[in-house]
Image (tube, rainbow, N blue to C red):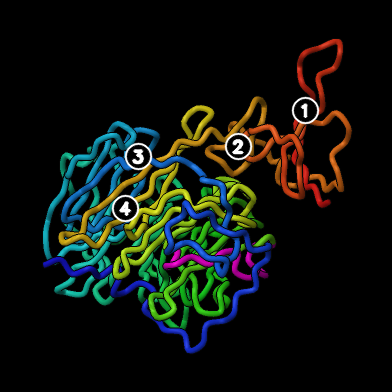
Amino acid sequence: MTIILSVLLAFTQLSLERQSPRAVVDIVPVTSGVTAAFAGSDRPGLDTDSGFTWNLQATLPSTVLIDLSFADDSVGYACAELGIVYKTTNSGATWSRIMNLGFPYYWYGVSAVSRQRAIVTGFNNTAGTGIYRWTTDGGSSWDSIVTLDTANWLSRARFADSLHGIISAGWNGGVWRTENGGRNPSDWSYVQIDPQRGWFEGNFCYRADGRCYLTGISFCRSTDHGVFWDVQHSADPVFDGGVWFTDTLHGWTGGGQISAPVSGWVHRTTDGGATWSDRLIETPAPVRAVLFLNDTLGFAVGGNVYSGAGFIYSTVNGGDSWRLDVNTGAEMKGIDYKVVGDSIDVWCSGFNSSSDFTGRIYKTRIAVTGTGIGEWGVGSGRSGSRAFVQPTVLRRLPAGAVAFDAMGRRVLNPKAGVYFVRGEPQASSRKPQAIRKVVVTR
């Protein structure tokens, strides 16, 4: 019988007293179309917009999906408990099982470094050791299982490039890091981040510039590929679970608890983590992972297998308000994205509490840009500009200006918020003026 360790270990710390959330936005009533578990004016930050459309791509029996990672817009890998790995070569339309080891192997992290090269990380549940395994031919064959940590389980893995990688020793407050690809155990070195050995949970953010962020009992950040770390209290008074930064200033953390009252939350920073907002939203189950494509467009996913709750939320204004995209009924834990031309594909994985614990994978495609509009922080940056990072602050838009939201949709009556703005075309040319990012404060 499958033992669902993901829910036994995640968010099990009990708070003595839950802090009363102070919403940074007005409460928006939820429409009757939202499932009762998500309804109620006591949940701050909810928006009545239906959000993005997600397609259920895979329903995988007897599969407790934990994480997924895409090498590009076509090839991706998903890992699960009991030594299971799935692969897709068609952007998630179909998935094939390429590993099925069974007990005592549990995969809690996967990172697709390229189409052919991927690593899965986790633990041997009998020996209590942290393990990993590589493929260099797209999953047709796999190296032998390597025991990297003889005392601690391993969880998620991420690579900033082909050489620099980090594996979270999530329940010991540390990480393993490599600077030469990590094929062999001697390629990795251990760093004890939190001297109190507090656990980490949820997804973590590892950027190509060497900055890395992890959350859990503490909020931890590194600027040098994980050599040195700054450790401070979690963004939430209870604890965090999942973190994402789009640049050196803008970041978000998720979190939640499965002790009564079961709930989740999201916090935001605009100064690199020095200070954090109050809870932007409260959800009916823990937020397990957060992902932002720029400083306005993002997702919070999670759930609780014990109560049959699961969700994908989205925001287009940096977290001031949120839309319930999908009531999945499955505990969502993994999320990844890839740029596809002028759009972005986002995938999300999890599992429900049916009799055999069925894995689920969802996907949405977002047209994030209008003509000439880009945003640094999305994809490789080829379609964006650092000029957008420092917006112009205005009380109102100038006459003749045309405003677009984060997804390139024209806004006829802009309220307070962040917009991309261009002037009207000159009479002598049909070419629009340059686009700039502005914050409207009125």
Q: Which residue is mark 2?
A: 407
Q: Are marks 1 and 3 in contact (CB under 8 Å)?
A: no
- Percent from the top left, x then y, of residue 43? 55, 66
Between discs 1 and 3, the one toward the N terminus: 3
Disc number lying in front (2 or 4): 2
Amino acid at circle 2: Met
Q: Which residue is mark 3?
A: 114
Label 2 neighbourhood size at 10 Å, few (<14), some (14-19), many (20+)?
A: some
Q: Which residue is mark 4?
A: 110
Question: What residue is rendered at 45% in x and 64% in y?
Answer: 287
Q: Which residue is mark 1?
A: 434
Of tags 3 and 2, which is closer to the observer? 2
Q: Is residue 173 visible?
A: no
Q: Amino acid at mark 3?
A: Ser
Q: Is the stretch drawn in magenta largely helix, strand or loop?
A: loop
Element under label 2? Answer: loop
- Image marks 1 and 2: residues in contact by CB distance under 8 Å: no
Amino acid on which disc 4 is placed: Val
Residue at 14% x, 73% y: name it: 126
Mark 1 Cα-neighbour bin, 10 Å: few <14, some 14–19, many ≥20: few
Q: Give the distance between the C-alpha atoms of the residues marked 1 and 2, in whole angstroms.
A: 18 Å
Position of residue 102 measured from the top left corner of the image (x, y, whole percent): 11, 59
